[in-house]
Image (cartoon, helix red, strand yellow):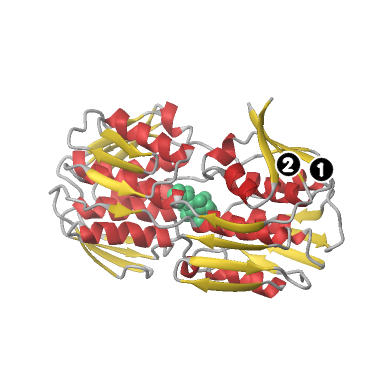
Amino acid sequence: MDYLHITGGAKLQGEINISGAKNAALPLLSATLLSNRPVQIDNLPNVADVKTLAKLLEHLGAVVSWLTPHQAQIDANHIIHTKAIYDIVRKMRASILVLGPLLARCGHCEVSLPGGCAIGARPVDLHILAMEKMGAEIHIEGGYIVAKAPKGLQGTQIVFDKITVTGCENVIMAAALAKGRTQIINAAREPEVVQLCEVLQNAGVEIQGVGTSVLEIIGTDREPLQIPTFSVIPDRIEAGTYLCAGAITNSHIRLTNANPTHLEAVLEKLRQIGFRLESNRDSIELFPATKRESFEIITTEHPGFPTDMQAQFMSLATQCNGTSVIQERLFENRFMHASELQRLGANITLKGNIATIVGSESSQLVGADVMATDLRASSALVLAGLVAQGSTNVHRIYHLDRGYENLEQKLTALGAQIERKSE
Ligand code: UD1
């Protein structure tokens, strides 16, 4: 198994190119199931989760041709299976994203229940309720969601009592081929949801309210879509993670192919801490701070502070003067990185969903062996390793490989001392 060996203390400097967004790529790849013509997708991130979803599409019968490592053509004309098997779904919860499109296109499907995951129970009840509201008959059998809608799905009003990103994306995709108008109340407003809507609009689907919490979608009544070539939006979480790498080492770095409008809450937090930032349409530059102040974060849905940036800011808090407080509101068990950061000497106290971090610019973390527990927790440990005295080994980095493309090459290019090794 691979691990990352990091020698802390290096200042970073230079430019880093942000990859396509994993969380946009996954629903967009699933949306190709709505089409019976080849769809070309550009700027796909070369990460394990994208490969897993491509494998799932192939398993269903789609032909996936990689034109380059970042560009694929998917032809889902012949769907030969409608079962998303446990073996693939257990590797990636987001496989649930094929539920809506498969059901809408084929009138039936079986999707393995994703089960628990490191950051909490993460149920899919809202996905199932929404499909039932659209006319599907669903039961659970042998660990699978067995869904049938032989006459197709019917447009209706879906009221989400909780905002769910992939749940909303599933309904949007199902609604695109449903009969009549679907209204989604309390829809997710994440940039990845917006891009899914825009791609479907370009395929001729009428969607109103894009980017707001009320969406209206007019379905094609099972007429497959023709989706024009498109390019995946930049990964805002990867961008935020590298900004934190610059911030924790108090360095001057510049991100290219990054969209600052997708990151406003994160940029604002970095400003509050003391960093100067300059943004253009597709670049963000971070300048060192003269003093780094402690901060407070409450994670929430977009456009609020993203839960996917919480772990990285916890590492950063160890290097800010005073007491920082982080409240995690979306996932009940998303502080697993805290005990690993404590192994590096971080002063962190947990109480329920609130973490209190006492940090200082002069406080020195000390390198140790640490274990990654989930995708974003892994990147938080890498960030801490960049400033810890001596060597830090981050184990179980397969979590990291799920969502960060060439992380060690990108950090090395900025001057970090980091290498991938095998146990
Ligand atoms: C997506 C992102 C993930 C991010 C999360 C929150 C993808 C592939 N993943 O995950 O990186 O951390 O949004 O921004 O885009 N919930 C239910 N029932 C459901 C669905 C969700 O109770 O049926 C709860 C969840 O347990 C959680 C909250 O709703 O507490 C939000 O989860 P959700 O937005 O669905 O997360 P994902 O879409 O899985």
Tell me: 72 left or right of 385. left
Query: Mark 1 sits on what residue?
Result: 367
Percent coordinates x, y for residue 127 in the rendering: 38, 49
Q: Along the horizontal axis of the image, is 98 left or right of 411?
A: left
Say whether residue 160 is left or right of residue 152.
Answer: right
Which type of secondary structure does the marked residue at label 1 adopt? Answer: loop
396 w.r.t. 380: above or below: above
Give residue 40's position: percent from left, percent from top: 26, 46
Give the amino acid at mark 2.
Ile
Left or right of 385: which side holds 61? left
Mark yes or no: residue 406 visible. Answer: yes
Residue sitting nearer the eye, 150 or 101? 101
| SS for callout 2 | strand
Evaluate whether residue 117 shows in this view: no
The answer as to whether callout 1 falls within 8 Å of ligand 1 is no
Q: Nearer the viewer, residue 302 or 75?
A: 75
Expressed as whole percent of the image width and height from the top left, the position of residue 65 reads 29, 35
What is the crowding at mark 1: few (fewer than 14 residues within 10 Å), some, or many (at least 20)?
many
Q: Nearer the viewer, residue 24 or 184?
A: 24
Which of these two is toward me, 220 or 130? 220
Residue 422 placement: quadrant: top right
Q: Earlier in the sequence, mark 2 or mark 1?
A: 2
* Count of marks, rendered view: 2
Q: Which amino acid is tagged 1?
A: Gly
Callout 2–callout 1 Cβ contact below 8 Å: yes
Q: Residue at x 50, y 54 (%)?
A: 18
- Residue 6 - label: 2
Q: Quadrant of the C terminus?
A: top right
